[in-house]
Image: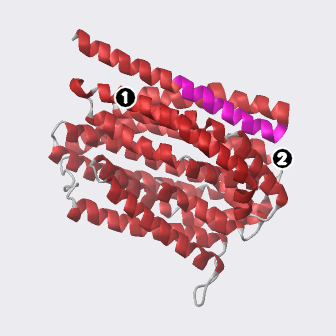
């Protein structure tokens, strides 16, 4: 997971060396990048949930066919996104508030970046299947290797080297495309030949549609919650843009740094879903509640340590991405005010994954809606009016805390009702 998140972080770091305009341009792309990421991850969540339950029920061949059928659907969805992205490239970023001086840079980056969409979708499903099959270490090593290739290629294509031309901001996009393509090739080898986790797709249309429905039963609600996140990102971008390009550039940096700090929770989420799916049998359900208790304790400890370290090193971290004192100061403010809430944000991420693993995607969607609509939007709007940019950061932290509390209480109640129902039966 850390390797996966390093793609955007590495791109932002190297693009930041090109100047504040390039950094601001990258910041405007974040909601769209997050949208594509959310759709791919949500689809992979659907595949992983159904696949894990099939394996847990002893239906290995059906699980293998599910993977093949789901990959076909993932490819069709990703290609559709790619073509729509190219078609609406200019108008999308005009709507997000990008000025003429940044639009050229944005289009130079996003033009080739959209080629990454199908490769990212396939690789995300590959990684989810490997994790659900018990090969999480292999998936992790593949991700790390791909990330290292991305980090090596970034400076070569952005700044040029020897016969390699200087592509500047477009080089970051081409690096991502090449790295993901290699990841897809290696992932395909692992699933088809090394571990034999995939069989030939069903030639029966009825069977294929059945597999798609099973996957989309979890994936569509998960996509619904996933779409809320980039929508909130776009909302934040519009608010922050009112404070000037330095604020937008700083937002782009912290939106890349925050997921790196949250990698532990994303990694847990990738495990929690299959874990809950594998432990649906009545005699194993006590493991689910114990897992949530452990996640809660760990989340508080990790959040406390991270908050202190980020508070002490905020300006130093900002200086990695830019030499602008104004941008560094805004980055440091975010890293002072928000990280204490990361623990409860992690609890919400784990709770959402747990509901998906239980085959109950609706509560997962509702948690995301509650966080954004009931907590995030009101809190950041009030914060902006009371304290400007820092108020937006405090509003974000407040929303994380409230959503984390609600999510833990909800999943705990759901598990207790499940246990009570089993006892009554």
Main secondary structure of the magenta stretch: helix
Residue 91 lies left or right of residue 81; in this view the side is right
Q: Earlier in the sequence, mark 2 or mark 1?
A: 2
Label annotation for residue 356: none
Residue 301 lies left or right of residue 380; in this view the side is left
| Circle 1 residues within 10 Å: few <14, some 14–19, many ≥20 | few
In the image, residue 215 lies at what x, y percent?
A: 33, 40
Q: Is residue 12 above or below residue 18?
A: above
In the image, residue 209 lies at what x, y percent?
A: 27, 42
- Residue range highlighted in magenta: 388-406
Residue 234 lies left or right of residue 134; in this view the side is right
Q: Label 2 to label 1, Cα distance in Å? A: 45 Å
Mark 1 — residue?
Answer: 290
Q: Secondary structure at mark 2?
A: loop
Residue 414 lies left or right of residue 117; in this view the side is left
Give yes or no for residue 25 being in the magenta stretch: no
In the image, residue 391 lies at what x, y percent?
A: 78, 35
Q: Residue furthest top?
A: 424
Q: Secondary structure at mark 1?
A: helix
Q: Is residue 371 above or below residue 72?
A: above
Residue displayed at 79% across by 50% down: 330
Q: Is residue 219 above or below residue 365?
A: below
Q: Nearer the viewer, residue 160 or 297?
A: 297
Residue displayed at 72% across by 50% down: 312
| Circle 2 residues within 10 Å: few <14, some 14–19, many ≥20 | few
Q: Nearer the viewer, mark 2 or mark 1?
A: 1
Give yes or no for residue 396 being in the magenta stretch: yes
Q: Is residue 282 above or below residue 69?
A: above
Q: Quadrant of residue 402?
A: top right
Residue displayed at 54% across by 70% down: 151
Mark 2 — residue?
Answer: 243
């Amino acid at each position: 997971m850390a390797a996966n998140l390093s793609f955007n972080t590495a791109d932002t770091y190297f693009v930041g060396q090109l100047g504040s305009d390039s950094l601001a341009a990258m910041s405007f792309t974040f909601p769209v990048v997050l949208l594509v990421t959310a759709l791919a991850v949500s689809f992979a969540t659907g595949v992983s949930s159904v696949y894990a339950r099939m394996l847990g029920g002893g239906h290995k061949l059906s699980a293998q066919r599910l993977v093949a059928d789901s990959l076909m659907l993932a490819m069709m969805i990703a290609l559709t996104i790619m073509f729509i992205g190219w078609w609406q490239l200019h108008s999308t970023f005009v709507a997000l508030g990008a000025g003429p001086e940044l639009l050229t840079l944005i289009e130079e980056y996003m033009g080739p970046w959209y080629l990454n969409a199908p490769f990212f979708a396939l690789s995300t499903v590959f990684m989810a299947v490997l994790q659900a099959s018990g090969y999480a270490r292999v998936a992790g090593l593949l991700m790390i290797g791909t990330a290292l290739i991305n980090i090596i290629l970034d400076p070569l294509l952005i700044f040029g080297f020897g016969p390699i031309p200087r592509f500047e901001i477009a080089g970051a996009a081409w690096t991502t495309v090449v790295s993901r393509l290699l990841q897809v090739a290696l992932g395909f080898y692992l699933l088809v030949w090394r571990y034999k986790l995939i069989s030939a797709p069903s030639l029966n249309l009825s069977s294929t549609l059945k597999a798609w429905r099973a996957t989309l039963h979890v994936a569509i609600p998960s996509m619904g919650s996933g779409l809320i996140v980039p929508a909130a990102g776009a909302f934040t971008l519009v608010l922050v843009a009112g404070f000037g390009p330095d604020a937008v550039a700083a937002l782009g940096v912290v939106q890349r740094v925050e997921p790196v700090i949250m990698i532990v929770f994303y990694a847990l989420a990738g495990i929690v879903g299959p874990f809950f799916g594998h432990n649906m049998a009545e005699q194993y359900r006590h493991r689910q509640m114990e897992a949530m208790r452990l996640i809660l304790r760990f989340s508080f400890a990790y959040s406390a340590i991270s908050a202190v370290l980020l508070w002490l090193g905020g300006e130093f971290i900002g200086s990695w991405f830019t030499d602008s004192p104004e941008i560094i100061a805004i980055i440091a403010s975010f890293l002072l005010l928000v990280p204490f809430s990361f623990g409860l944000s992690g609890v919400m991420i784990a709770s959402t994954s747990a509901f998906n693993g239980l085959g109950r995607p609706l509560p997962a969607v509702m948690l995301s809606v509650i966080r954004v609509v009931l907590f995030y939007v009101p809190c950041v709007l009030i914060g902006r009016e009371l304290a400007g940019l820092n108020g937006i950061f405090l509003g974000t932290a407040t929303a994380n805390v409230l959503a984390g509390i609600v999510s833990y209480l909800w999943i705990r109640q759901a598990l207790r009702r499940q246990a009570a129902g089993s006892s009554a039966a």
